[in-house]
Image (cartoon, rainbow, N blue to C red):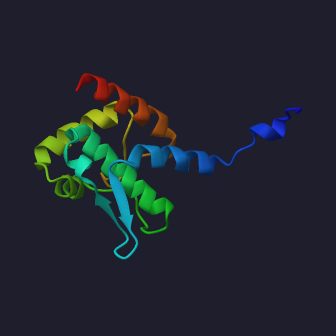
Amino acid sequence: MRKTLRDLVVKRSEVLESKLYSLLEKFVRFDVESGEAVFEEDFKELPLERKVLVLLLAQRALKLLDWTKDANLSTGEIAKRVDEPLSSVEEVLKSLVEGDLVKVDSAGRYFVELSALDAIAEFFERVMYTM
């Protein structure tokens, strides 16, 4: 069978959705009734950096599903959702922003850009091997 350039054509949105799915599948489900992310038991065992990333990834997924208007979360919202002290979350967010895994908007709210999914996947792999 002859290969053509058309064999390489993909929808970027489907590729990104697949990457996002692979990062979230072990840790989160989405409740169609409440429109919220529901975190699995494995989520609770994650180090704080990964919890924050999974939360922000889940928030991005909710936006892609059109279940929320805003994918960005404040430090306080993040601390509450991961059930960790605000000061610890602030420290982790600073590190994630410095590592270019997380962005901060003009209102001081945090989010993940879809273009960072590969870097986040690599970060997850590094963290797994150092645990």
Q: Residue at x 47, y 49 (%)?
A: 21
Left or right: residue 20 versus residue 105 is right
In which quadrant of the rendered image does the N terminus lie?
Answer: top right
On the image, the x and y values in percent for residue 97 come to 33, 37
Q: Residue at x 53, y 50 (%)?
A: 17
**Quarter residue 88 falls in:** top left
On the image, the x and y values in percent for residue 119 come to 44, 32
Q: Residue at x 42, y 34 (%)?
A: 121
Left or right: residue 42 versus residue 99 is left
Asked if 57 appears above or below 46 in the picture, the reply is below
Can residue 110 be seen? Answer: no
Asked if 66 appears above or below 90 in the picture, the reply is below
On the image, the x and y values in percent for residue 22 come to 46, 44
In which quadrant of the rendered image does the C terminus lie?
Answer: top left
The outermost residue toward the top is: 130
The outermost residue toward the bottom is: 33
Circle count: 0
